[in-house]
Amino acid sequence: MILQVRDMKVRYGAIHALHGIDLEIAPNEVVALIGANGAGKSSAVKAIAGLLPYSGEVVYDGAPLRPAGAERNVRKGLVLVPEGRGILGGMSVEENLLMGIYSRPDQKAAQADVEAMMERFPILGERRHGKASLLSGGEQQMLAIARALLARPRLLLLDEPSLGLAPKMTSFVFDLIGSLRRDGLSVLLVEQKARQALKISDRAYLLETGRIVASGSAESLANDDVVSETFLGGRVQAGSENTQHR
């Protein structure tokens, strides 16, 4: 496993955001963490990324991580694209991309990767000298993901990447996630658009009020009667027996 989380608890003062969750991700796997707004999904990925204090254990690539170690985690290949994208609006598109390579020791190759990224996403190349704040929401999300990819992650944490996007751009983002897996990247995908997330994921965890209440293959969760009726807005296909309820 590239990531193992055991008994993770997160608190905001007296408020318990996570009540001891377990999850794991294998290499070259997309795993969805789904649930309603306020379920604790963002708290989970922020804690894994090293941005929040937590108790419990997080093991990445066979080595334990420590809370408040976000910069070290990036250098190890664990990179978060935060909810809201986190772009630097007053800086240019190119300057935002350059922020993605600050931790890389191979600066010559990294500079070449910036140019390659703008070829991969032509709209970023066209607007390289323009302010990032002038991009559309979908273009800003594209920029945020491109910046993260420039850090050469092995595990990418995506927190609500479709939030506020038009349907066409949402489809683009989900297609991009599928291509990242084909490139050999592991992805932990946090999403409220549960059905779309399950379609591109290998496995999934369902989070409710800080607890994992179901887990299993993405297909089994999508087809499970109880999960579908309660969390996904109704059953679409025949049920499966492989879902693990907790």
Image (spheres, grey):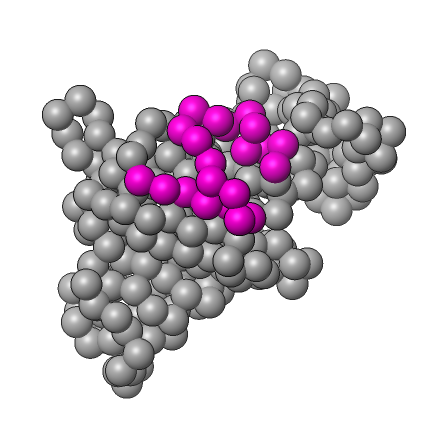
Residue shown at 46% from the left, 45% from the top: 59
Give the camera-side residue of 106 and 166.
Answer: 106
Which of the image's four quarters has the C terminus? bottom left
The outermost residue toward the bottom is 238
The outermost residue toward the left is 14
**What segment carries the magenta color?**
56-76
Residue shown at 53% from the left, 49% from the top: 62
Would you say residue 57 sits in the magenta stretch? Answer: yes
Would you say residue 62 sits in the magenta stretch? Answer: yes
Q: Is residue 172 left or right of residue 10?
A: right
Residue 130, how many percent across, how many down? 69, 22
Residue 153, how many percent across, how many down? 63, 43
Q: Is residue 42 above or below residue 200?
A: above
Residue shown at 12% from the left, 25% from the top: 14
Residue shown at 42% from the left, 51% from the top: 4
Q: Within the image, what quadrant is residue 222 found in? A: bottom left
Q: Is residue 148 left or right of residue 189?
A: right
Residue 215, how many percent across, how many down? 30, 64
Q: Within the image, what quadrant is residue 112 found in? A: top right
Q: Within the image, what quadrant is residue 235 found in? A: bottom left
